[in-house]
Amino acid sequence: MTMQALNIIDMIKLELQPGETIRWAGKPKFGPVLRWGLGPIMISFIPIGITSREVFQLLERISIGKGPRVGESYNEIVTHVVACFFFFFGCYSIATAILKIIEMSQAAYAVTDRRVLIVSHLFHKRVRAFAPTSINTVEILQKSDGSGTVTFRRDVVSGDDGHVVVKLDLVGVDDVANVAREIERLRLSVQQSSSLR
């Protein structure tokens, strides 16, 4: 077992409950995690692109000591403020997405006999645990090398803009078919135990 695999197992073992056993543990591949995070990054470039000219012109004037022009109208000042807000919001969104990619690429995944675990460490430890009752689907997106993504929860959330599908995934898994089998086994274990009562 490699040092990387030992680290994954150690990360998961720290979160286990008494008597809980690991059925599968792994780490996401960086490439799929990067592709997963590129969407928010690309969208964040839109407000930056729209507002960058206005922001850079304002910054250039401030850097040479001119600041806002004398007699600028209220509308021009509001335009500067709005442009700066959207520019820096886009920058913040990109930084957040990059940090999320880094966090997820260093995560440890596990399927135990009681739950699905996602443990990550970036600036602080984050543990997400999903009981078998929260698993409402088991879907895979598999590549030719056997790796891929396992979706284990899918919800349709209604909002002002209509319906949005929210998914919980294990992204960039090496042996996606095996992981899907373990998650399905975990989901069915609850149904079997409830039918025996």
Image (cartoon, rainbow, N blue to C red):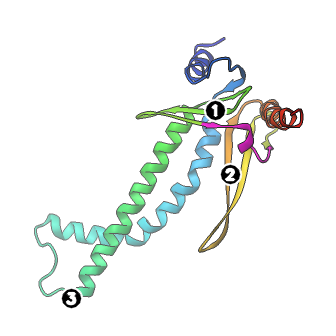
CA separation in Å, label 1 and label 3? 56 Å
Image point (69%, 32%), residue name: 115
Front one among 49 and 11: 11
Front one among 150 and 34: 150
Tell me the residue that label 3 is attached to.
Answer: 73
CA separation in Å, label 2 and label 3? 47 Å
Front one among 17 and 107: 17
Rendering coords of residue 121 (x, y %): 48, 31
Q: Are marks 1 and 3 in contact (CB under 8 Å)?
A: no
Residue type marked 3: Ser
Magenta stretch, residue numbers: 129-139
Going by the image, does 150 lie left or right of 87? right
Residue farthest along the top direction in this orientation: 1
Residue type marked 2: Lys
Going by the image, does 30 lie left or right of 189? left
Image point (31%, 68%), residue name: 84
> Image quadrant of residue 62?
bottom left
Rendering coords of residue 49 (x, y %): 43, 67
Tell me the residue that label 2 is attached to.
Answer: 167
Going by the image, does 178 lie left or right of 120? right
Q: Secondary structure at mark 2?
A: strand
Q: Quadrant of the C terminus?
A: top right
> Image quadrant of residue 59?
bottom left
Rendering coords of residue 106 (x, y %): 54, 31
Q: Which mark is residue 117?
A: 1
Residue type marked 1: Leu
Q: Secondary structure at mark 3?
A: loop
- Eyeballing the image, is 10 above or below 137? above
